Image (cartoon, rainbow, N blue to C red):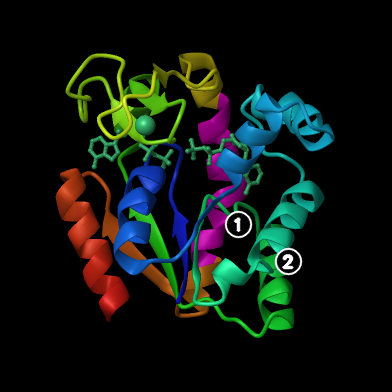
């Protein structure tokens, strides 16, 4: 089963992906996580991506497509995958079709997490992430048991440098201009499933799970 999670920054893609991959036992592929890892290791990819990510801009398609092409070839993707935050442009979606076809795979579901734009800023500026395991929290909406400490692994929580009010504005503009047109693209292919991401986290998870179970 190959699934795509779409939605604006802060919609809950990462939060839901963590839960869905543990139930459905498919790898979680996040291009955002891949860029952050490369940036922290200062690899050539990371250095190149940093110039875009730090400004809240999308990384160019050719760079992003290359990461996904390599990742989907790994044997752990044989039973399926959950793509979180990819594709984000029509050109990426076209590239994904080519990659999937060449690997004999197909996209089964595109889940769109719809969230009122007015909620996104508060979600993003309050987001905290575990340095060790990547788990996502929110200082108000989904706080850890102990301030600044991960419930799962006791790792230290940090705030992403692009989760500031200024960068969020740019990221939302990128979403509206480049990513939102993909909704029509996937609706046209009959793959789009809409989920209301404004609801309680557990409720969103159960709606996604039942869609995936078909
Ligand atoms: P995305 O990966 O789509 O950018 P995240 O999953 O990182 O979104 O969620 C953004 C922030 O909003 C995080 O701090 C997360 O804890 C919080 N969050 C996620 N889902 C919900 C929800 N349904 N209700 C309230 N807060 C949420
Ligand atoms: P969010 O959780 O807020 O949706 P991500 O962690 O998915 O954000 O992405 C963070 C940043 O990484 C983006 O603002 C962008 O710079 C880059 N990025 C992630 N995925 C893509 C993609 N598919 N295409 C281009 N850039 C991407
Ligand atoms: Zn952790």
Indicate left or right for 149 with 68 as reference. left
- Marks 2/1 in contact by CB < 8 Å: the verdict is yes
Instruction: Find out if the beta carbon at label 1 lies less than 8 Å from the nearest ligand 2 atom.
Output: yes
Q: Is residue 174 magenta?
A: yes
- Position of residue 52 relative to residue 76, above or below, is above
Instruction: Point out residue 164 in the picture as x, y percentages from the top left corner.
Output: 48, 16
Q: Residues within 10 Å of mark 2 (few under 14, many from 20)?
A: some
- Tell me where residue 5 sits by quadrant: bottom left
* For residue 129, above or below residue 101: above
Residue 1 shown left or right of residue 72 in the figure: left
Mark 1, residue position: 87
Q: Is residue 1 magenta?
A: no
- Report the number of discs: 2
The tag on residue 29 is none
Q: Give the residues in magenta.
A: 170-184
Q: Is residue 120 above or below residue 32?
A: above
| Element carrying mark 2 | helix
Q: Quadrant of residue 38?
A: top right
Residue 165: x and y, percent? 46, 16
Locate the C terminus and report the quarter of the image it occupies: bottom left
Q: Main secondary structure of the magenta part?
A: helix
Residue picked out by circle 2 = 95
Q: Quadrant of residue 155?
A: top left
Residue 151: percent from the left, percent from the top? 25, 30
The residue positioned 43% from the left and 35% from the top of the image is 133
Residue 142 in the image: above or below residue 5: above
């Amino acid at each position: 089963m190959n699934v795509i999670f779409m939605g604006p920054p802060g919609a809950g893609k990462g939060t839901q992906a963590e839960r869905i991959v543990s139930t459905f036992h498919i790898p979680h592929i996040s291009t955002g996580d891949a860029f952050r890892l490369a940036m922290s290791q200062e690899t050539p990819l990371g250095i190149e991506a940093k110039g875009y990510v730090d400004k809240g801009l999308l990384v160019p398609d050719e760079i992003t497509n290359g990461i996904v092409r390599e990742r989907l070839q790994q044997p752990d993707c044989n039973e399926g995958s959950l793509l979180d935050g990819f594709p984000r442009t029509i050109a990426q979606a076209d590239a994904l079709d080519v990659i999937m076809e060449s690997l004999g795979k197909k996209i089964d579901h595109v889940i769109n997490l719809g969230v009122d734009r007015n909620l996104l800023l508060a979600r993003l500026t309050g987001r905290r992430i575990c340095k060790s395991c990547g788990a996502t929290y929110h200082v108000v909406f989904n706080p850890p048991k102990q301030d600044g400490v991960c419930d799962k692994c006791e790792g230290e929580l940090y705030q992403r440098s692009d989760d500031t009010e200024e960068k969020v504005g740019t990221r939302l503009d990128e979403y509206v201009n480049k990513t939102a047109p993909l909704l029509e693209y996937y609706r046209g292919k009959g793959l789009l499933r809409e989920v209301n991401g404004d609801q309680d986290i557990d409720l969103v998870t159960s709606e996604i799970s039942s869609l995936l179970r078909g």
